[in-house]
Image (spheres, rainbow, N blue to C red):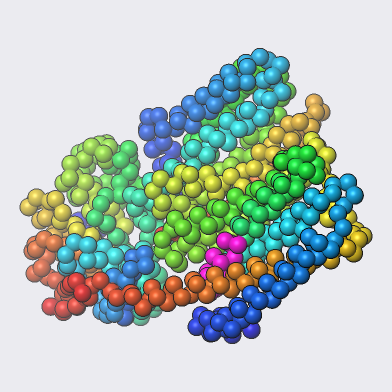
């Protein structure tokens, strides 16, 4: 059942001819504009590059949050799924997985290219990819959560960003901190473990909360 | 065609008792009472905006009613609305970028009836165009897809919001035939409509909504 | 007692006599506290008169946290038991809570400039209070954007509860962040052995802030219940239904 939902979302996303690219374009644009406005020299950009990449990912992801539930709510699909006996929790799980694949995965895949443009050393690129992948559940679930709350509100993107931001800040902080204390021996420092914990908490609390919010909106 | 309209052997009852429905903070109507059972054809009539859609949604379980009770019983045992209802709203809920086949197969999988997809497509005459994206359908084709989606749920209670809207005579004929077949096999049909069609020959209840 | 008061009309009767009572106590305690903090207590050695800002800042921060905890409790009641009074309570707690958080940030800033030379610092405490401020704004936005009362109440309660679980996470994360980057701004509040002359006005101000908070909440619930009663009385159905059997 969940697989069917995920498959359908991905098929639609792949045929939508470009809305998936929106996040990607914003990501690259952010990095480009940030680099240009900071002067463009390597000694300025290199220490800032993890932060720039993280910020670009967070902002690009926030842009895509609005599309998670709004369309399905408006055209009546959510009600039909409910009539078909699909639980709100399953819908949220399916949406989380398809959102990660269609919105976050393209961004993460572009990180190595962008990192090279910012002159990041290879070991750092490895670490930042690891932190981003670990933080993905957190980034996804909180987006699903605020999108579920704002499902009924047309043009609720400001509202969604407002609600998600307090929860994304710890992810941002620990994602960047674990990069600072990463060593060549092991990237599993304590900050990374906390990041793992944050993502797990997001799943354990954020998903049921999203399901509750979705159910409330459909009553 | 027989296997698309299964015989409904059990007694199904919808007991609506003193139900009030609100939209937002505005009360639409109160104290609706009625009992609906197998072979019933219920037609909801009323002007635009009076609350027909809200009434249908309340019965379908998609809108919470503010007082009263709606009970669904199979052979006298209480059950949830989820196992019984196929609801077709006035606007189509097709995903525009999917083909007819993909759209119908998706919902068939949700209701565990994927084996019926081909037969249903042939029945509503969409089998020849099953690779057409739903955004490219004519009104008639879209309506036939909606009927297909209702049939494929194989649920006993069918609820339609304005099923005849925009349909030519052939389309109306098809809808009436399908509804009659379903009712004759023991099903329940509840529909809201402005049009007066042959379905009125077998109607068993009319719910009239008038402004206060 | 909560069960007794849980009936909205009983609550209105109760608050009719109780809220002026609380109001007067608040006023008296505030006057006493202000006397102690502005006149009687001595100025601190290094920072001079500006230390008196502490008497507005610390109680505000304390009330902001008190408010959020009670908001979470009210939200739990609202979510689990769907009690309309819990909805009113939650809504009436959040507005003063937001105000106290803003006051804490503002007075902290005004104190920080003369005392430590800076309006703001991205350290643990300040960042997590700022985040708390955003959570309050998000919470109140739900109430104002979503028009259906029951839905707004339920969605807001979900946000409040998820937010509560994140408060320790946020506090934890920014404390950690802070220790790796900047030395913590030294706060004399947590240190034991505050001299009596400073402790007394501090406690008095905290008490009067808390009483003021309670008064605001009771008044808010009163207003909310009254508004709901008026709305219920006006609510006539737009249509009527007739069922014909044929």
Q: Is residue C46 left or right of residue C157?
A: right
User: Residue C74 occupies which quadrant of the picture?
Assistant: bottom right
Any part of residue C116 in sight = yes
Q: Percent from the top left, x then y, of residue A129?
A: 65, 30
**Where is residue A48 drawn, in percent x and y?**
68, 25
Quadrant housing the C terminus of chain A: bottom left
Q: Of residues B50 and C42, which is closer to you in this image?
A: C42
Name the foreground residue: B196 vs A118: A118
Q: Is residue C78 left or right of residue A8?
A: right
Q: Which residue is painted at 28% across and 74% down in the image?
A: C237
Return the x and y of residue A135 as percentages of the image width and height. Answer: 64, 39
Instruction: Using the rendered view, name the quadrant where residue C218 is placed.
Output: bottom right
Name the residue rendered at 63%, 53% in the picture: C102
Above-or-below relation of C47 to A31:
below
**Residue B27 falls left or right of residue A195:** left
Residue C87 counted in the magenta span: yes
| Residue A77, magenta (yes or no) | no
Which residues are drawn in magenta? C80-96
Residue C21 is situated, as x and y percent measured from the top left of the image, at: 64, 80
């Amino acid at each position: 059942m969940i697989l069917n939902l995920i498959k359908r979302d991905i098929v639609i996303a792949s045929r939508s001819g470009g809305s998936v690219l929106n996040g990607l374009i914003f990501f690259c644009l952010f990095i480009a504009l940030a680099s240009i406005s900071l002067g463009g020299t390597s000694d300025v950009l290199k220490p800032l590059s993890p932060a720039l990449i993280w910020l670009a990912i967070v902002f690009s992801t926030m842009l895509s949050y609005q599309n998670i539930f709004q369309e399905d709510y408006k055209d009546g699909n959510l009600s039909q799924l409910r009539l078909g006996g699909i639980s709100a929790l399953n819908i949220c799980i399916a949406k989380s997985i398809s959102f990660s694949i269609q919105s976050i995965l393209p961004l993460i895949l572009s990180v190595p290219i962008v990192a090279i443009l910012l002159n990041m050393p290879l070991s750092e690129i490895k670490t930042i990819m690891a932190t981003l992948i670990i933080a993905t559940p957190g980034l996804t679930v909180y987006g699903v959560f605020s999108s579920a709350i704002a499902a009924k509100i047309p043009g609720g993107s400001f509202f969604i960003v407002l609600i998600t931001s307090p929860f994304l800040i710890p992810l941002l902080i620990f994602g960047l901190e674990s990069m600072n204390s990463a060593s060549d021996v092991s990237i599993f420092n304590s900050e990374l473990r906390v990041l793992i914990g944050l993502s797990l908490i997001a799943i354990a609390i954020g998903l049921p909360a999203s399901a509750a919010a979705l159910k409330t909106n459909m009553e | 065609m027989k296997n698309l309209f299964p015989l409904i052997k059990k007694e199904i009852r919808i007991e609506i008792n003193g139900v009030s429905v609100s939209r937002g903070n505005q009360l639409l109507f109160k104290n609706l009472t009625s009992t609906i059972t197998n072979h019933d054809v219920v037609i909801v009539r009323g002007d635009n905006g009076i609350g027909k859609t809200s009434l249908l949604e309340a019965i379908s379980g998609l809108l919470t009613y503010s007082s009263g009770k709606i009970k669904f019983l199979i052979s006298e045992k209480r059950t949830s609305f989820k196992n019984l209802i196929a609801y077709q709203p006035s606007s189509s809920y097709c995903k525009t970028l999917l083909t007819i086949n993909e759209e119908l197969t998706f919902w068939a999988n949700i209701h565990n009836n994927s084996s019926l997809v081909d037969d249903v497509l042939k029945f509503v005459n969409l089998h020849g165009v099953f690779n057409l994206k739903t955004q490219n359908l004519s009104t008639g084709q879209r309506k036939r897809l909606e009927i297909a989606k209702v049939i494929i749920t194989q649920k006993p209670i069918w609820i339609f919001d304005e099923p005849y809207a925009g349909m030519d005579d052939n389309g109306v004929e098809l809808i009436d035939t399908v509804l009659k077949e379903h009712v004759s096999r023991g099903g329940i049909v509840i529909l809201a409509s402005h049009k007066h069609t042959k379905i009125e020959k077998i109607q068993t209840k009319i719910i009239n909504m008038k402004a206060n | 007692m909560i069960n007794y008061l849980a009936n909205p009309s009983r609550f209105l009767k109760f608050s009719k006599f109780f809220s002026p009572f609380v109001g007067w106590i608040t006023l008296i305690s505030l006057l006493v506290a202000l006397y102690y903090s502005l006149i009687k207590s001595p100025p601190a050695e290094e920072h001079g008169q500006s230390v008196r800002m502490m008497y507005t800042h610390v109680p505000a921060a304390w009330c902001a946290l008190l408010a959020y905890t009670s908001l979470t409790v009210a939200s739990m009641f609202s979510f689990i038991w769907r009690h309309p009074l819990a909805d009113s309570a939650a809504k009436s707690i959040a507005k003063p809570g937001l105000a106290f958080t803003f006051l804490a940030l503002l007075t902290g800033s005004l104190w920080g400039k003369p005392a430590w030379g800076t309006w703001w610092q991205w350290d643990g405490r300040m960042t997590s209070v700022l985040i708390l401020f955003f959570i309050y704004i998000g919470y109140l936005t739900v109430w104002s954007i979503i028009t259906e009362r029951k839905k707004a109440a339920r969605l807001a309660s979900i946000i409040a509860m998820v937010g509560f679980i994140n408060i320790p996470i946020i506090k934890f994360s920014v404390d950690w962040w802070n220790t790796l980057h900047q030395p913590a701004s030294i706060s004399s509040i947590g240190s034991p052995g505050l001299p009596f002359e400073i402790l007394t006005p501090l406690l008095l101000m905290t008490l009067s802030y808390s009483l003021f908070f309670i008064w605001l909440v009771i008044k808010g619930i009163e207003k909310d219940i009254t508004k709901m009663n008026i709305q219920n009385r006006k609510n006539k159905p737009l249509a009527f239904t007739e069922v014909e059997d044929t």
